[in-house]
Image (cartoon, rainbow, N blue to C red):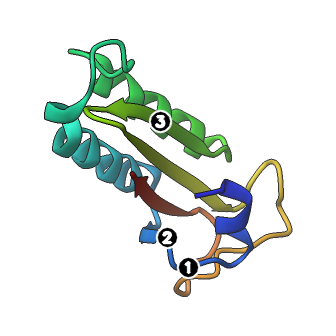
């Protein structure tokens, strides 16, 4: 998922939309827990890392930024997770959230795995 494309209107990769940064980060925590058994050694998501990733995501989203994480999984697969601040977004404040009737402070999430 490209972050710019997600804000610009592509909805096929969207897995959720939330009004609160904490709720969006909870989605991230759930995905990290879901894929934890498949993380490879050295993937950057070892014991204790998920909590740091989630806390950092909340902080970044509240500041109007996006979050993009990627991890290698067992046997050639890669997990890409993204949380996007729809409005207001620091980088592209003119782009609004195309999914749902969410106003300022909406967040979107998507997942790709291969």
Q: Are marks 3 and 1 in contact (CB under 8 Å)?
A: no
Asked if residue 4 is positioned above or below residue 8 in the image, the reply reads: above
| Quarter of the image with the N terminus in it | bottom right
Q: How far separated are the C-alphas under marks 3 and 2?
A: 16 Å
| Left or right of 32 on screen, residue 22 | right
Quarter-of-image position of residue 84: bottom right
Q: Residue at x 49, y 70 (%)?
A: 13
The percent position of residue 76, horizontal first and vertical second, equals 35, 37
Q: Residue at x 55, y 41 (%)?
A: 68
Sequence-first disc among 3 and 2: 2
Query: In the image, which disc is placed on residue 67?
Result: none
Asked if residue 3 is positioned above or below residue 108 in the image, the reply reads: above
Residue at image mark 1: 11
Q: How far separated are the C-alphas under marks 2 and 1?
A: 6 Å
The percent position of residue 50, horizontal first and vertical second, equals 30, 27
Front residue of 78/34: it is 78
Residue at image mark 3: 70
Asked if residue 100 is positioned above or below residue 55 in the image, the reply reads: below
Residue at image mark 2: 13
């Amino acid at each position: 998922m490209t972050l710019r494309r997600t804000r610009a209107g592509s909805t096929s990769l969207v897995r959720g939309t939330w009004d609160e940064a904490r709720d969006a980060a909870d989605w991230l925590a759930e995905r990290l827990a879901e894929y934890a058994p498949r993380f490879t050694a050295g993937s950057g998501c070892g014991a204790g890392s998920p909590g740091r990733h989630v806390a950092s995501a909340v902080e970044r989203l509240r500041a109007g930024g996006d979050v993009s994480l990627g991890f290698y999984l067992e046997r050639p697969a890669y997990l890409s997770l993204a949380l996007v601040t729809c409005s207001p977004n620091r980088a592209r404040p003119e782009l609004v959230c195309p999914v749902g009737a969410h106003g300022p402070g909406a967040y979107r999430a998507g997942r790709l795995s291969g």
